[in-house]
Image (tube, rainbow, N blue to C red):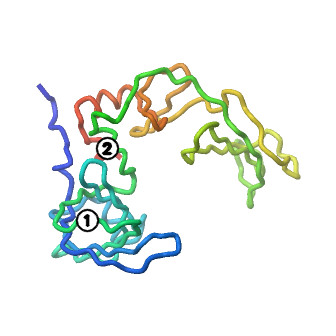
Amino acid sequence: MELHKRKTLEDFPKFVVTEVRRGATSEAGYTSFELEGSFDRILPSSFDHVIEGTGPRWFWLLFGERGCLCPMLKSFDKETRTAILTCQEKEEPRVVGLELAYLSSYWQGFDVWMVLDPNWGWERKQFQGTDAVAEDYEAKDVSIVGGREVRVWTKLEPTGESRGQSRHYPATDQSLPVRSGTRLVPSGWGHDHCELCKEHIDAGMFGYCDPGERWMCEKCYERYVTPRDLAFVDEL
């Protein structure tokens, strides 16, 4: 017997699309589209930042099995909850008449699909740590870290296929000029982060890894993936 009600996509606010209008196409091949429609209910507080411009103006709209759009808000009527959204896509979104689930920009669209899709490809294994590539660089401004002035930083990136991951640490050597080039740091990527709770998964710890080398801690896997529960979106 469940101790709490499982959260599903049906519990998300929905944007009901009534019209899609095509705009100009860039040299890169992306076309600008306007989506007109209305939200079916009062939106969470995260949407207030979108309306007021105090946070990111973009968010996610999810549909189908793994579909997602990343629109920006052009206009919004608080009384009727009607809105006009803009997005840049390679192909025209075939979403007229569909109900698209709203997801805050705090998350990634795939965070929902990795929990719901039974064929996502999670595998329980031990995190071993990986080699990293290090490169030193000089910052524009001086920072105070641990009571010392820091201007030279070291950027670390894991070896292998890049997912845009990087970490930045004060360089051991603060002398200028900065040494050029990159260097290999064996086992330099000594931990990863759970995609949902952001806790460390350190070398030697077990977790769940997907084919894209994303990691999830055992606690989040058991709490969300096993029951297909999307309650994590409410636990910012």
Depth check, front residue: 210 or 227: 210
Residue at the image point whose x is 67% and y is 41% from the top: 156
Few, some or many C-alpha atoms within 10 Å of disc 2 (few <14, some 14-19, many ≥20)? many
Depth check, front residue: 127 or 173: 127
Relative to 214, 93 lies left or right: left
Relative to 207, 235 lies left or right: left
Dot 1 falls on a residue whose secondary structure is loop
Residue at the image point whose x is 39% and y is 75% from the top: 32
x, y percentage for residue 47? 31, 63
Dot 2 falls on a residue whose secondary structure is helix
x, y percentage for residue 65? 26, 48
Residue bearing mark 2:
113
Amino acid carrying label 1: it is Arg
Amino acid carrying label 2: it is Trp
x, y percentage for residue 209? 44, 30
**Vertical placement of 193 versus 222: above or below?**
below
Residue 119 has which mark?
none
Residue at the image point whose x is 16% and y is 66% from the top: 97
